[in-house]
Amino acid sequence: MKKKGLLCLLTAGMMTLSACGTSTGDTASSNFKDEVVMKIDGEEIMKSEYMVYLYTTTKNFTTVGGDDIWTMDFDGQTADELVAERTLNTLQSVKAAIKYAAENKMTLTEEQKEEAATTSEQFVSSVPAEDIAKMGIDAAKLTPFMEGSYMYSLVYQALAAECEVDETEKAKYYEENKAQMKDDYTTLDIDTIVLDNLDKANEVVQKAKSGEDFQSLFAEYDIDDAAKEEGKGGAMSLYKAQFVSSFGLEEIPEVGQILEPIEMDGVYFVVKVNKITLPEDSEVKTMTETAFANQKQAEYSDARFAEMIAAQKVEYVDEVYKNLEKFH
């Protein structure tokens, strides 16, 4: 993936707290010292809160670009500098959202608070103990941070709802993009078999091409227990754009075609295309107009948050901030 593409991917979707990995413990380290890292408009940001956002941002970078990302140059910035920038932007956005919510009497429901608490427990249980120790958190300590993330989402949606979409612009967007949208949202119904060995994958391809029943081959060879439990025999439906992107292809195959093994994340997919369906014109119109409205509303919300962030004052506690640990 090109660096510019990576940069675009990394710019999006940084506000949601999420976790990855396997935990071997769920309590904060007794050696953790929770200190003030910075102030945003006079509010003290403790090390524990900053490290939570640093962790999630770091994991997002690694997921998108792999371990090699830490040696890349992004228009004169290192990946670590970009991570620090994104982490600060996320914190500022959350604090701006909390302030906006207070001024506009927006609160989380009890159900949302319970969901934040549950999500916090899931986060702590799924993150490696050594990373939990670096953050100095447990589920109870994480919950207020998670509530802040939830509030950000609510405020973002509230701001988006303020945006009025110009009907003339929407109609123009539809005319300019309907052909591409119809192509992108063409649906492929496929059968898949997942294997962990290339030789076996090639064997399955040859058997399928020689006429053996694909579902029988799935039952015999597929290693994805979750897919077997679903009882769909590896069947799935994907939009063309998703299909091409997910499997790294330049074009879609013909109906009935069985593809050569496709390697993804250490496993091999054998794919058979069963059906290709073009969306109705009415569906294309709805999807295109919705995409336009979502784009304009996102631009509006982003601009409002940019204004709020620009008005904030950030003060670093250098002796703490410059000595923070990393998560890679």
Image (spheres, rainbow, N blue to C red):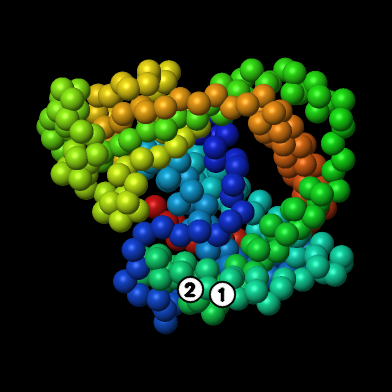
Instruction: Choose top left, top right, bottom left or bottom right for residue 82.
Output: top right
Q: Which residue in the rendered view is the most extreme toward the bottom?
A: 30
Secondary-structure class at tag 1:
helix
Which residue position holds label 2? 121
Q: Quadrant of the N terminus?
A: top left
Q: In this orientation, which residue lies closer to the viewer: 193 or 209?
A: 209
Which residue position holds label 1? 117
Residue at 63% over, 26% down: 280
Residue at 53% over, 64% down: 52
| Position in image of residue 123 (x %, y %) | 47, 67
Q: Is residue 255 left or right of residue 96?
A: left
| Position in image of residue 133 (x %, y %) | 41, 71
Is the C-beta separation of discs 1 and 2 under 8 Å?
A: yes
| Position in image of residue 191 (x %, y %) | 33, 35
Q: Is residue 172 left or right of residue 213?
A: right
Residue at 81% over, 24% down: 171
Q: How far is disc 1 from disc 2 in space, using C-alphas?
A: 6 Å
